[in-house]
């Protein structure tokens, strides 16, 4: 009899506990669905923003340090005299090359890409550049708000609150300098900088070496020189705080930065970087640990 009474007392508690967990589970599921729906809506908005953009065409005039080989490759001469071969375009002097109109100083700033970027800047003066990694879904505006740090971590291009945000330039970077640190989310819907972490595999790098970073004044092309798995470090702990570097304006700072990059890079790309090169760094979260981060370092070649 006593045992039955104890069971009767336990049953309501079990029911209450079950109801509580069901409520928590249901709420979590609702929030997850809501987040995915919101992320999908945000992704559609960015797709509409980029759908009418003109596509980049391969450039035929390399920056100093890169030369066209006369075939559909580009050869970069490294500091040690070695060379690195990248996908490129035929040399216009080659007998097999199709005629190509070369950009001039007079019309370089009037390309369709630049004109589109200027229109976006008119829509939102926070617009700084457009970033594209060919062969991936990374094809987004990059924002810059020096007086509102991290604003676009939680707002869309139209300044509405958004979970996925917009890629943005670190507010302490010099917009006219030669070092750009760009942050982007890595949402579950696989938008924004989600596929940046694919650079952890050298095979991915081999087929996705170039990054386009087009500003209000010119089209720019960078080549990825290193992929790094990192983390946000606790105060007082030692390690590479790449996110604290806002410029590489002295040779000592540049060498310190690149030494740490080379020590932590996941594989050797064989591409050298020298002080004075224009550097682009793309950073995102990478939850291999709670404070995990992933970033790639690229240098400008066009």
Image: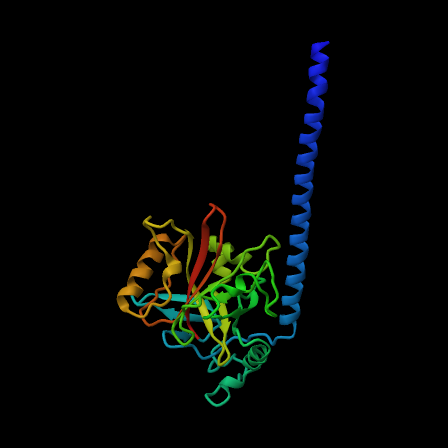
Residue at 60% x, 61% y is 162
Q: Position of residue 190 (x, y in %)?
A: 59, 56
Q: Seen from this angle, which residue lies furthest bottom?
A: 106
Depth check, front residue: 182 or 2: 2
Front residue of this view, candidates 42 and 79: 42
Give the quarter of the figure containing the N terminus: top right
Please give left or right for residue 68 compared with residue 117 in the image. Answer: left
The percent position of residue 172, horizontal first and vertical second, equals: 41, 68
Q: Nearer the viewer, residue 202 or 196?
A: 196
In percent of width and height, residue 81 lies at: 30, 67
State the residue at coordinates (59%, 69%). Answer: 157
Question: Is residue 206 visible from the viewing direction of this image?
Answer: yes
Q: Is residue 102 visible?
A: no
Looking at the rendering, which quadrant does residue 267 occupy?
bottom left
> Going 33% across and 61% down the picture, which residue do you hit?
257
- Is 115 left, or right, of 265 in this rendering? right
In the picture as drawn, the residue positioned furthest to the left comes out as: 252
Image quadrant in which the C terminus is located: bottom left
Vertical arrangement, residue 32 with respect to residue 116, above or below: above
Image position, residue 292 (x, y; %): 45, 50
Q: Is residue 294 above or below residue 110?
A: above
């Amino acid at each position: 009899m006593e045992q039955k009474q104890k069971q009767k007392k336990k049953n309501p508690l079990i029911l209450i506990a079950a109801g509580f967990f069901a409520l928590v589970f249901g709420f979590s599921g609702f929030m997850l669905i809501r987040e995915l729906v919101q992320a999908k809506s945000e992704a559609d908005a960015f797709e509409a923003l980029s759908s009418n953009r003109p596509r980049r065409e391969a450039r035929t005039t390399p920056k100093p340090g890169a030369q066209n080989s006369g075939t559909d490759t580009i050869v970069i001469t490294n500091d040690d005299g070695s060379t690195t071969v990248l996908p490129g375009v035929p040399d216009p002097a080659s007998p097999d090359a199709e005629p190509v109109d070369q950009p001039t100083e007079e019309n370089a700033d009037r390309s369709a890409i630049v004109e589109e970027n200027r229109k976006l800047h008119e829509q939102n003066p926070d617009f700084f550049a457009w970033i594209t990694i060919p062969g991936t879904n990374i094809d987004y505006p990059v924002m810059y708000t020096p007086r509102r740090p991290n604003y676009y971590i939680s707002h869309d291009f139209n300044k509405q609150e958004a979970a996925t945000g917009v890629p943005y330039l670190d507010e302490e970077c010099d917009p006219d300098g030669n070092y750009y640190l760009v942050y982007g989310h890595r949402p579950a819907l696989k938008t924004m900088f989600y596929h940046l972490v694919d650079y952890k595999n050298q095979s991915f790098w081999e087929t996705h070496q170039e990054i386009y970073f087009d500003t209000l004044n010119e089209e720019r092309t960078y080549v990825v020189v290193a992929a790094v798995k990192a983390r946000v470090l606790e105060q007082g702990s030692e390690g590479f705080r790449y996110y604290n570097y806002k410029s590489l304006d002295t040779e000592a700072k540049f060498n310190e930065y690149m030494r740490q990059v080379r020590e932590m890079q996941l594989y050797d790309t064989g591409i050298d970087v020298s002080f004075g090169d224009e550097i682009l760094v793309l950073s995102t979260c990478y939850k291999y640990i709670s404070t995990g981060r992933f970033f790639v370092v690229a240098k400008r070649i066009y």
